[in-house]
Amino acid sequence: MTIKIGILGYGNLGRGAESAIAQNEDMELVGVFTRRDPSTLTIATQGVPVRSANDLLEGEKLDIDVLVICGGSATDLPEMTPKYAARYNVIDSFDTHARVPEHFANVDKAAGNNGNVALISAGWDPGLFSLNRLFGNCFIPQGKGYTFWGPGVSQGHSDATRRIDGVLDARQYTLPVEKALDEVRSGSNPELTTRQKHTREVFVVAAEGADRDEITKQIVTMPNYFDEYDTTVHFISQEEMDRDHSGLPHGGFVLRSGAMASGATSVIEYSLKLDSNPDFTSSVQLAYARAVARLNAEGQKGCRTVFDVAPAYLSPFDGDYLRSHFL
Amino acid sequence: MTIKIGILGYGNLGRGAESAIAQNEDMELVGVFTRRDPSTLTIATQGVPVRSANDLLEGEKLDIDVLVICGGSATDLPEMTPKYAARYNVIDSFDTHARVPEHFANVDKAAGNNGNVALISAGWDPGLFSLNRLFGNCFIPQGKGYTFWGPGVSQGHSDATRRIDGVLDARQYTLPVEKALDEVRSGSNPELTTRQKHTREVFVVAAEGADRDEITKQIVTMPNYFDEYDTTVHFISQEEMDRDHSGLPHGGFVLRSGAMASGATSVIEYSLKLDSNPDFTSSVQLAYARAVARLNAEGQKGCRTVFDVAPAYLSPFDGDYLRSHFL
């Protein structure tokens, strides 16, 4: 069975999903949908139509097995995912942790009432890191869990820096503190403050004549974004920015450690090192899109998360092959 | 719901399962079953009966939700798991990779025909490492996977060494080669030979007057066990053995790396560092026992592996809690 994928939204994630389809032989891109004027959009794949997002909601239902919804968590997805889940199987990467219960309930209602499966919050965090937080809790029931992010670019922090007067361009890297990581790896279950776990490094292109000390001060004291961290600011040229900081690398670590009933310590560590955050996120999303198509083909409906998907559903291979090759 | 656990076999794994139950508040040990004379066995838990393994097969079915079968993969489990799966939900740690298809088929038939759920090959390898091999293949479809074991004690290699003339006691450690691990972590997808991935270190207590050079030669040239590895042999006293080598630590690494369609490299690394191999294995088994009880309560039947279990089934917490705390 070929899984027919539609992509809604053509930013970093949409383009990532488009290109990842080439690595999944059981999938086919059947359309890219946009809220912009479709005639203004040129996509990488030849022969695939670019259509208005309205076409998904109006008229006849299109022949799409799973719609990958690529939008922002702040305002796009809370509105988009339930709306499209009422007509199609969908997947999103909703990542506002505090609003997951509400989003889940809305999507569950829309998908469940219409016989569709929706999977929310697919990616690596939330997503694979979530799985490892859950697994750690199950396999080391009496222990402590840790998540470290980076080294990697935080787009939210980069954007916040760009809004400062006199800043022309900025890139923010989140860095895990190696000493803290090593303490956790030792199994000592340390208590770590925000400042002890991560540092931040910002590369800034300043306008000519801008007050660099003032820019630095505004960055390092910015509430919520930087004030709880040790932050280093570097001023560079736009050339250096374009040459050295155009990628979107990311990654991180999920650890769990604790004592078994005998007193013996166990430490589980999961880590990702990604040259391209959106490309890997898209690859994870496509594997979960495969699961969504199968769950729906089995007659399931409603909202799911990565916690609800048996790993075998993610793979193009059948059970015999999986047991022979990966068990 | 309290999950009633029976333990069949009281070696390292059986004792590990018994002690792990104390860390899982939703579980209760209802009996330890042995093929020995039950009167010769004293268990750690007060007030729990030790009974003959025959009691599981004869007479009335006992009130057990999941039977944890603790036996060897070579001869015990191929015979035991299907036999007991015909009467009870069961879980085992079958680890002879080449014979998994046959074992799966036998257990599936016995469990399926009698309305029970059986989960085979639960632990960390096979088990959690299997999951990570599968995940890696799904999320980095075009890449290479690697498994490294250790540092840790291999009981098979220790036993093989003990069978050499003049060897009174022996302990074998498997060690991953740090340089090879680092090459894999770099994302260069190296081809690695057996010798390049692991070394072996053996601690031997020799009989008085034994020929140590001969013992060393017999160890390092032993076919299948040592001949393909660089092996170091240390002669120590029985006192040193008892003092420094009485534990059963183990662990290892599962890595997957490859390029996304864009060319960007992704590396996934999963690792375990375990002071006690059997204790952690048992803890993993109990989490899967919880899943087995639930799957069966839902009306499922037949053989499963870790690939077939949605992560949420492993946790004592409900979906709302999982989404709020771990997603």
Image (cartoon, coloured by chain):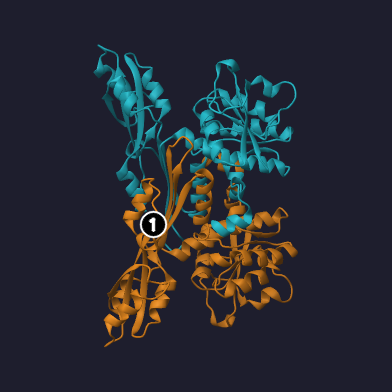
Chain colours: A orange, B cyan
| Residue A139 appears in the rendering | yes
Res B294 → quadrant = top right
Res. B220 in view? no
Viewer-side residue, B30 vs A81: B30
* Mark 1 neighbour class, 10 Å CA radius: few under 14, some 14 to 19, many 20 or more: few
Q: Nearer the viewer, residue B188 or B44?
A: B44
Name the residue type under label 1: Leu
Residue A190 in the image, given as x and y percentages of width and height: 38, 51
How many marks the image carries: the answer is 1
The residue at the point 40 percent across, 49 percent down is A189
Name which residue lies at 38% across and 34% down.
B152
Q: Which residue matches tag 1?
A: A192
Depth order, front residue of A219/A203:
A219
* Left or right, B248 with reference to A1: left
Q: Residue furthest bottom?
A: A209
Q: Split into 4 quadrants, where in the image is the N terminus of chain A?
A: bottom right
Dot 1 lies on which element?
loop
Left or right for B94, reference B151? right
**Which residue is at the far front?**
B46
Residue A264 location, quadrant: top left
Q: Is residue A303 left or right of residue A245?
A: right
Residue A63: x and y in percent read 69, 66
